[in-house]
């Protein structure tokens, strides 16, 4: 018994270190991305995920490598957690050929088929039906994978959300819809946009299991997600999870963290529940992490992010020929042969 | 050669392709139990089962997106819109998802999907149900857009569309389903992007597509009685357009009429005329004339509807005009 407990806590420690590392990587990566944006190395719209890291880390830690992930334009964190290399993400932000989509997508459109990362999508709500289709394909093939679909809380007010959940409920598809409720869609507070405040309850309209969880607590997120994953694999049913979170930065790089639609005091209140600090404290209390260990992890991550920056900076721009590549796919001539 | 309807030609294409490849499935409103709003999918539910012939709620945006998502991970959906008018609700998925995915993902996710359904005006269905959408769709890089005008083309082109690795929009003529034509037994494929010379003549070219092919042929028959022989160039595919076929015909006849079902502004015909002025400017003996729908929403009253639609008489008048006969 005693040995078992010991090995459990060892496994726990390894997992906890992984979770902390995953969150801290996102944070440090995006702090540098903000810097690169200010320097003009990154262009266009750029939406940071700072404050929400426990959502990506917690949920994705409950997945298998053959599961599918699809998300919005706020996708850097999700991509990194899924295993898209920091170099490839940074190079994509820089618009370089070694980016994960070779400079064709930028901040909002990260994809990596090698890790079943089905992309960052720029039309609010538009990717939700795609996730439903992935769930349909899993069922069609008779697999036990799941598809996870992240969305902001503002997306639940659009038709795509409702159409998708209805079909997923109707046909029992293994899709887990995760609402990252960071309280605002750009400058519009959720209270000003949704007729009901408890968004997870919308699952009930479509006979989809629902749950809500504290998104600043990575372990709680992981646990809630694990239950949904079990439902999806075992019973092939969908779930709707509302994760309560907050972004500590502006909607995108072009607006301030606070001042117009939310107060500094409100922001500071939420910052007290920074998911990384909270989890670090949990680990320290459990004797799993010393200050020195944390500092070492932080140093390593910063070095990895610097490496990603240098890599991106040295990666060439895409060749001009790329402009006309990948508009259409080649259809193999042998399928066009008549029987 | 057997003579069958356009409807049955499409049906046979669906059935053959579903037999050939079990990744192919059909999804849309009333495609299963009801056998299809226009009966194109008759009997397919019985043959292929509920997983491959999927009746949906009335949720165009949703099921179009479902199709795109399933195509990202290896299936080959055929999404049927009850008519293309209703596909407007799904245009986000056609344009922002299907057409962009390959490019946006740097070549990682192509979308082998067919969006199909009846297009264009039928009879007295009024403004919301009488629209030809090809110029909207043809505008979008990343899509292929086909408008078969005969049973023969419908079968061969739909089969190619299903095997294509890209999103293909198939605009079927709502008024064509009952039309008949020769269709050989067994399998054949018609390559996308290739026009077809449906009638040969030396005096003028009529360049057209879709349902208007029949109108052009009617006009050609009439004109022949007066000794005027025209080329009828059926574009068949409007994106990518067979620019060579247009040039070849116009360089031969030196005169062109462009006939389309939809509206004038930014229509398919505008693009055809642009190709003609680029490639055939020095060959032209007269300015090109276009025939198209009147620039109004489709009215209901029989006489007004007739006045709004392009037809053989208007096409004949246009040919006579470019030939300086009137
Ligand atoms: C259909 C559509 N409408 C508007 C926009 C512009 N827009 C981009 S993000 C956004 C707010 C979305 O908020 P939310 O869903 O809560 O996600 P968050 O940004 O908070 O992660 C808006 C209005 C868009 N991209 N797509
Ligand atoms: Mg939000």
Image (cartoon, coloured by chain):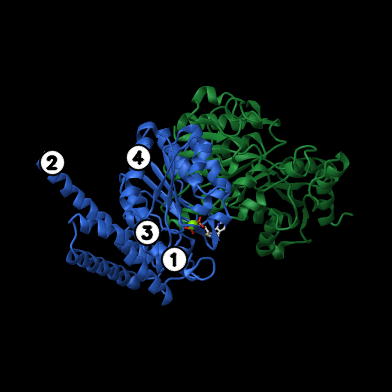
Gap in Å between the C-alphas at discs 2 and 4?
A: 24 Å
Q: How far apart are marks 2 and 1 (CA)?
A: 43 Å
Residue at 19% x, 52% y is A13
Q: Select label 1 or label 3 by which is in front.
A: 1
Q: In this view, does A96 lie to the left or right of B130?
A: left
Residue B1: give x, y in percent of width and height: 62, 27
Q: How far separated are the C-alphas under marks 1 and 4?
A: 31 Å
Circle 4 chain: A
Q: Which of marks 2 and 4 is nearer the N terminus?
A: 2
Seen in the image, is B24 located left or right of residue B270? Answer: left
In this rendering, which labeled residue sits more in front, label 1 or label 4? 1
Q: Tag 4 or tag 3, which sits nearer the N-term?
A: 3
Q: Which residue is drawn at 65% across and 56% down?
A: B247
Q: Are marks 3 and 4 on the same chain?
A: yes
Residue identifier under label 4: A227
For the residue pair A1 and A65, the one nearer the viewer reads as A1
| Residue at the top extreme of this rendering | B46
């Amino acid at each position: 018994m005693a040995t078992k407990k010991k090995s459990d806590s060892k496994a726990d420690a390894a997992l906890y270190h992984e979770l902390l590392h995953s969150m801290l990587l996102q944070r440090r990566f995006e702090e540098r991305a903000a810097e690169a944006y200010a320097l003009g190395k990154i262009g266009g719209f750029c939406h940071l995920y700072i404050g929400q890291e426990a959502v990506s880390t917690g949920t994705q830690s409950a997945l298998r490598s053959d599961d599918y992930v699809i998300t919005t334009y706020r996708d850097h964190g999700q991509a990194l957690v899924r295993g898209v290399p920091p170099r490839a993400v940074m190079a994509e932000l820089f618009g370089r050929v070694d980016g994960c989509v070779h400079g064709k997508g930028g901040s909002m459109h990260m994809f990596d088929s090698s890790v079943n990362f089905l992309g960052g999508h720029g039309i609010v709500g538009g990717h939700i039906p795609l996730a439903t289709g992935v769930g349909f394909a899993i069922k069609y093939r008779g697999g036990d994978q799941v598809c996870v679909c992240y969305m902001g809380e503002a997306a639940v007010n659009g038709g795509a959300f409702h159409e998708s959940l209805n079909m997923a409920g109707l046909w029992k598809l293994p899709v887990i819809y995760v609402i990252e409720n960071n309280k605002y869609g750009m400058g519009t507070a959720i209270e000003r946009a949704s007729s009901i405040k408890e968004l997870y309850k919308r699952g009930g309209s479509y006979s989809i299991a629902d749950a809500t969880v504290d998104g600043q607590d990575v372990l709680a997120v992981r646990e809630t997600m694990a239950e949904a994953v079990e439902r999806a694999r075992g019973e092939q049913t969908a779930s709707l999870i509302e994760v309560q979170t907050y972004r500590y930065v502006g909607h995108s790089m072009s607006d301030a963290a606070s001042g117009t639609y939310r107060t500094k005091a409100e922001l500071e209140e939420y910052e007290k529940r920074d998911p990384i600090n909270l989890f670090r404290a949990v680990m320290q209390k459990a004797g799993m992490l010393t200050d020195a260990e944390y500092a070492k992890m932080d140093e390593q991550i910063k070095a990895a992010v610097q490496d990603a920056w240098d890599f991106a900076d040295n990666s060439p721009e895409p060749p001009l020929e790329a402009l006309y590549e990948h508009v259409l796919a080649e259809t193999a001539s042998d399928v066009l042969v008549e029987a | 050669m057997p003579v069958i309807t356009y409807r049955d030609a499409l049906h046979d294409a669906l059935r053959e392709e579903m037999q050939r490849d079990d990744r192919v499935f059909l999804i849309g409103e009333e495609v299963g139990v009801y056998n299809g709003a226009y009966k194109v999918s008759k009997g397919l539910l019985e043959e292929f089962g509920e997983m491959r012939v999927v009746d949906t709620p009335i949720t165009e945006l949703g099921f179009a997106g479902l199709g795109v998502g399933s195509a990202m991970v290896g299936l080959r959906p055929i999404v049927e819109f009850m008519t293309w008018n209703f596909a407007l609700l799904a245009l986000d998925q056609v344009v922002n998802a299907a057409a962009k995915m390959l490019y946006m993902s740097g070549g990682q996710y192509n979308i082998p999907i067919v969006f199909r359904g009846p297009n264009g005006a039928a009879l007295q269905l009024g403004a919301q149900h009488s629209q030809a959408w090809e110029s909207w769709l043809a505008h979008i890089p990343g899509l292929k857009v086909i408008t078969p005008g005969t049973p023969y083309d419908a079968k061969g082109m739909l089969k190619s569309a299903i095997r294509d690795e890209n999103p293909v929009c198939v605009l079927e003529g709502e008024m064509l389903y009952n039309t008949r034509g020769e269709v050989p037994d067994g399998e054949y494929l018609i390559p996308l992007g290739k026009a077809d010379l449906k009638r040969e003549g030396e005096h003028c070219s009529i360049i057209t597509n879709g349902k208007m092919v029949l109108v052009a042929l009617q006009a050609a028959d009439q004109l022949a009685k007066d000794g005027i022989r025209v080329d009828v160039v059926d574009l068949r595919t409007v994106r990518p357009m067979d620019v060579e076929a247009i040039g070849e015909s116009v360089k031969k006849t030196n005169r062109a009429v462009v006939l389309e079902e939809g509206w004038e502004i930014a229509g398919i015909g505008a693009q055809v005329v642009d190709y003609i002025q680029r490639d055939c400017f020095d060959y032209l003996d007269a300015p090109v004339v276009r025939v198209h729908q009147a620039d109004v929403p489709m009215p209901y009253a029989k006489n007004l509807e007739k006045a709004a639609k392009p037809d053989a008489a208007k096409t004949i008048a246009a040919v006579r005009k470019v030939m300086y006969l009137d």
